[in-house]
Amino acid sequence: MTGWMQHLIVAPIVLPIAVSALMLAFNERRRPLKRLLSLATTAGLILIAALLLWQADGRFDVGARASSLAYLLGDWPAPFGIVLVADRLAALMLLITSVLGFTSLFYALARWDRSGPRFHVLFLLLLAGLNGAFLTGDIFNLFVFFEVLLAASYGLILHGSGAERTKTSLHYITINIATSLLFLIGIAMIYAVTGTLNMADLAMRIPAVPAGDLMLLEAGAAVLGVAFLVKSGAWPLSFWLPRTYAVAAPPVAAIFAIMTKVGIYIVLRLSSLMFGDASGGAAGFADQWLIWAGFATMLFGTLGILATRTLTRVAGHYVLVSSGTLLAAIGIGGQALTAALLFYLFSSTLAVGALYLIIEPVERNADEEDMIAGIAEPVFDDEYTGAVSGEENEVGVVIPGTIAILGGGFIFCTLLLAGLPPLSGFIAKFAIIDALFDDSVIMPTAWILIALIILSGLATLVALTRAGIDLLWTPAEDSPARLSIIEVAPIGVLLAACLALMVGAGPLYRYMEATAAVLAERSSYIDAVRLAPRGGETVP
């Protein structure tokens, strides 16, 4: 990539930060302008992510091979300077984040962006932090981007009013501040052993770590891993997640569906780079812990799905099931299983985001006592924000087919999350099970994972069907919920994306297989950083 295209890798971080800084110059009465800027930015991020994915797949030039793209900030060579790396995996995560960000923001325009100040600024900063976490090639800068996205998430989780939301948000903030401290401790211990925090440099140095220092390195990695497992929602560190996601505004909960996957992404990235087969004495570190943590998380999430009757809690526990499945698959390892788990990550993240968006209009007809305080309360009157009361602020008119639209979308989400054929959820779970059967001798842990995948799918089907009967297909005295195109369109886009995953499963799965091969090989990532161009020259 030459010319201005070589700077494309930094755009997913710089663009949302620059636009959010610009919006700080406008007060809340300029909301139409802020909406336009935010939508244009998130749409631009989708285009940028698609271009980076195209580049990572080697499609810009005929005959070009897939490559990892490294960008040296300030033109300082790695490992001394800050480096951004866009390979297949990072580009895929950028695309998921951008699609989910655009649809969540579009849904928020119905009324949720008016329930508090600075919504669009915080939302764009969250996207910048997420994109930075996926692109960074340095563990300390990963911490910096984590803090950016967490700081923005603190404001978004508190967005709106309600005592329950405020109480739960304070718990969320406290837990993440404590986790950040663990993050720093783990970073310090790894740096004390290796003398570097650049991921590619770590991959080259760890095989040469003396046996006497190996225990300190693994201890640092374990502390760092605990921080990532908290953010991934792994049991028993997941007690905060279902309740926190339940009280968040629907568009906020939808974009939060990708936040647990940041922890999964880092575990996968560092496992392949730092503790892969070529890592000497550190090879395979903590794989067994990941497997059993994943199993426990899946079981806890499955029991939570069956135990709760609130849709937002069901969605939160399904996020745990998804995280547990990915953690267990990472621990078991193997190139075929890595490709399958990446397809599952793509499908489940978009499906959960769609479910969070569809929950609010579905529950709009429910009795007030059945809803968690703070989920669908009317927006408040405030001269500063310009917001008005909920009844006067409803968008759209009663649609005769409202229940049909909501019911159809809800059924589609149920089939996706339960993993029933022929949708992408089934393809992803079948691919995982098929990868587990690739070996001539199936390990007992593989049988446990297969059983938990089937059990969690059945639990999801039962819980969502029960909720759908209660909220949609039971006759109600009240008129159907009001829907507007602003609410229907983003839900439709996410469900259409999941449908596209089913239709285009072949090419997409080949991309996942190529991504898994690059992760297993490591040399593409390391060489991209080591030989990153400086001022038009190649670093020897």
Image (cartoon, rainbow, N blue to C red):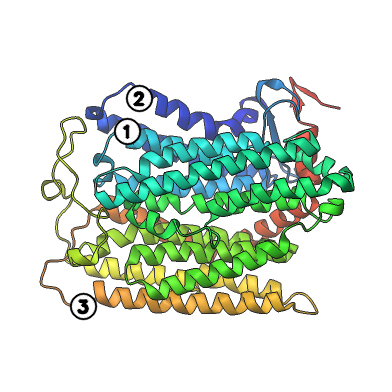
Q: Amino acid at mark 3?
A: Thr
Q: CA distance from mark 1 to mark 3?
A: 39 Å
- Residue 416's spot in the image, x, y percent? 46, 69
Q: Is residue 327 visible?
A: yes
Quadrant housing the C terminus: top right
- Residue 312's spot in the image, x, y percent? 35, 62
Q: Is residue 217 left or right of residue 474?
A: right
Q: Earlier in the sequence, mark 2 or mark 1?
A: 2
Residue sitting at x 33%, y 78%: 466
Report helix, strand or loop for mark 1: loop
User: Crowding near pointer 2: few (<14 within 10 Å), some, many (20+)?
Assistant: few
Report helix, strand or loop for mark 3: loop
The residue that mark 1 highlights is 118
Q: Is residue 538 left or right of residue 127?
A: right
Report helix, strand or loop for mark 2: loop
Q: Earlier in the sequence, mark 2 or mark 3?
A: 2
Tags 1 and 3 touching, CB below 8 Å: no
Residue sitting at x 80%, y 52%: 521
- Residue 67's spot in the image, x, y percent? 73, 43
Quadrant housing the N terminus: top right
Tags 2 and 1 touching, CB below 8 Å: yes
Of 539 and 128, which appears nearest the observer?
A: 128
Q: Is residue 420 visible?
A: no
The residue that mark 2 highlights is 24
Of 52 and 244, which appears nearest the observer?
A: 244
Please say if 176 is above or below 431. Answer: above
The residue that mark 3 highlights is 474
Q: Quadrant of residue 443?
A: bottom right
